[in-house]
Image (spheres, rainbow, N blue to C red):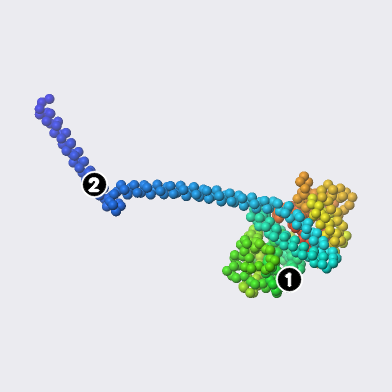
Amino acid sequence: MDLGTERADIEPATERERALVEENARLRRICGALIERVESAGMADGAPYGAFEHAVLLAEQVRERTDSLHRTLEALEEARAEAEAANRSKTRFLAAVSHDLLQPLNAARLFASALEDQALPEAAARQVGHIGRSLKDVEALLGTLVDISRLDAGVLTPDIATFPVAELLDVIAEEFRQLAGARGLDFRYVPSEAVVSSDLALLARVVRNFLTNAVRYTEHGRLLLGCRRRRDGLEILVGDTGPGIDEAQQQAIFLEFRRAVSEPAEGDRGLGLGLAIVDRIAAMLDHPLHLASRPGRGALFSIRVPYGRREEAPTAEVPPGMHDLSGARIWVLDDDPAILEGMAALLEGWGCRVRCAATPAALEAAGRRERADLLLVDYQLAPGDPDGLSVADRLRRRHPGLGVVVISAHQDGELTQRARDRGYDCLLKPVKPLRLRLLIAHRLEAGGA
């Protein structure tokens, strides 16, 4: 290669280097401009990478705090789930043991009622009256706790049926007429011939709670129980001339442990749960509640119940007053000896002829030799024995005209429906003597017809 050719090869290489140097300088100018732009838009100290590091640090802190928050929320959720499980366990326990809780109370009420029907010396009669009132207080308190537990546990199922409202209100009116009279209050009851569709036992609980509050808080004046026909249902009303309720408190009194008055009367053992139970039952039945009240002018509580078809209502009427039960032959089946003894004392005091049995086998053996008009049977018998419905079915096959009343401590819509499908009646424990007497009279009159 000659010298001219070598010089020709070097000159293009030098030009490429020069172009690269110029390109590098141009890129440096661009980079400097970008850095200047970042510094002018960055932090006050003009450190662009400091701003970047600060942003990274903030992001890390946010992530750490988010993780900590998630862990806290998970712990809270776990604690909430444990608390709800404990609450459900408590409510299920109270709902399950209600039979055992109410059994001795039922026996005591029967004995006290049987004594009240006896001709006793004045002092003894007064003591028996005190016992009866104390037992009613215990029944109200225990029944309230059991009811609220059943509602919380979701074990109450409505048993919707069609019935004349008088079948419900006549009995309640007689019961509270006596309570109001004992407190010196006038009691007015306006009966109705309307037919409604509801759960009779749950609706009775609502009306009784209304009247219990009316009696409790009315010191003088009068009480009212009646009905008003509305286009979309029958409005059952309970009014009083008590102290009234301020408008600001009218929603709060339907909450747990709230009372209509801040200072209850001496001897008032209520828990402030009655209206909370009313509110939950009304919501379960989809029956609207209403309260109208002004301080010093009394209160008017009401519940609106849908109408039922009249042709579906029972044709037999509830017999008025205290029907004569003399000579009625009644079988009683219960695995609790105290219940049997108390029921026998009560029924025999009404003139009935009573056969008591603690086991189905004993009652079936007696049934081969004699007949009865009515069977009172506890649904939950001793372990190993069939339930009360099964025993009643067997006895009805042998004695087709036998009336049946199933007694249970559980407000169970399915049980009530099964009993109704067989033509049986149901009563809840503790058995109310007045309700039992009217039901027996109704059954005997229906059977005679």
Which residue is more in the foreground, 341 or 25? 341
- The quarter holding residue 323 reads bottom right
Q: Quick one: label 1, few (<14), some, or many (20+) residues within 10 Å?
A: few
Q: Which residue is mark 1?
A: 183
- The quarter holding residue 435 reads bottom right
Q: Is residue 202 visible?
A: no
Q: Which residue is mark 2?
A: 32
Give the residue type at disc 1.
Answer: Arg
Q: Residue most toward the front?
A: 123
Position of the N terminus by quadrant: top left
Badge 2 element: helix
Position of the C terminus by quadrant: bottom right
Q: Quick one: label 2, few (<14), some, or many (20+) residues within 10 Å?
A: few
| Image position of 55 (left or right of 299) | left
Q: Residue at x 63, y 62 (%)?
A: 257
Q: Position of residue 264 (x, y in %)?
A: 66, 67
Q: Residue at x 83, y 51 (%)?
A: 357
Q: Residue at x 41, y 49 (%)?
A: 62
In the rendered image, the vertical position of residue 272 relative to residue 406, given as above or below: below
Q: Residue most toward the left?
A: 3
| Image position of 136 (left or right of 398) | left
Q: Position of residue 347 (x, y in %)?
A: 83, 59
Q: Position of residue 130 (x, y in %)?
A: 77, 65
Q: Is residue 366 visible?
A: yes
Which residue is more in the foreground, 201 or 378? 378
Badge 1 element: loop
